[in-house]
Image (spheres, grey):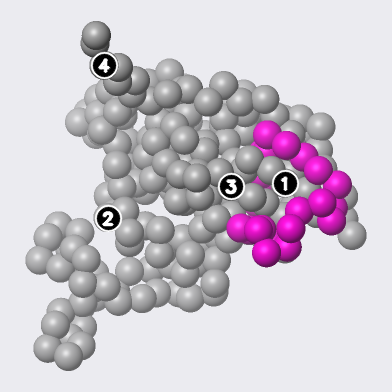
Amino acid sequence: MKEKVHTSAALALQDVVRDGMTIAVGGFGLCGIPEQLIIALRDSGVKDLTVVSNNAGVDDWGLGLLLQTRQIRKMVSSYVGENAEFERQFMADELELEFTPQGTLAERLRAGGAGIPGFYTRTGVGTIVAEGKETREFDGEQYILERGIRADLALVKADTGDEAGNLVFSKTARNFNPMVAMCGTVTVAEVDHLVPTGSLDPDGIHTPGIFVDRIIRTVSEKRIEQRTVLAT
């Protein structure tokens, strides 16, 4: 079996990144984002990227780092409300946005990974989401055609992985990471805990290693997107 374990994020991306790629990135807010892989992607200097992700990070963390350096040409996202630099670039027509409802985005990623080129959904019918898309009637209801997403590269973050690439995600990090891992032509995972193959309970694996090409162990900061405290 091909060796999947790499010693650093930079080495894991060394020969797979290029200008103009489509990259799918896992995470939900700042939860479960591949922090060190995003930093390595920034440091690689690649540009004109199309990035598919639930969100655009915040100004100084996550995908916000790539927005700062103007490496992203287009975002395919469902929520971008925490990033002022994203808003500035979008309003100035410096950044292209394909806004996609959250459930639709998850299914587009899953469909792409499953080899399904498209599917029909009622979500977005009668809104700007439906503009330019094929529509069809089923059982008296209108549906729009959404395309599955295949990415050149997928970057994900898991709590635990083994040397064969099997992954276990923690809580909210499981919202998008499994679908992102499926849709990549090349998928790279960073994990908090790297264990020998065979250490994980097969029934507890969320993403089988067949979807993962490279894996690294990292130490994450796990920043909190919004901290709310109760005054006493």
Q: Earlier in the sequence, mark 1 or mark 3?
A: 1
| Residue mark closest to the camera, 2 vs 1 | 1
Q: Which residues are magenta?
A: 187-208
Q: Nearer the viewer, mark 2 or mark 4?
A: 4
Tag 3 residue? 169
Which picture quadrant has residue 83? top left
Residue at the image point whose x is 33% and y is 59% from the top: 103
Pick whichever of labels 3 and 2 is earlier in the sequence: 2
Residue 89 versus residue 215 in the image, above or below: above
Q: Quadrant of the C terminus?
A: top left
- Image depth: mark 3 or mark 2 in front: 3
Q: Residue 89 sits in which quadrant?
A: top left
Q: Residue 72 at what x, y percent from top left? A: 44, 35
Label 2, label 4: how many angstroms apart (C-alpha)? 32 Å
Residue 66 shows in this picture: no
Residue lying at the far bottom in this picture: please name it: 139
Q: Amino acid at mark 4?
A: Leu
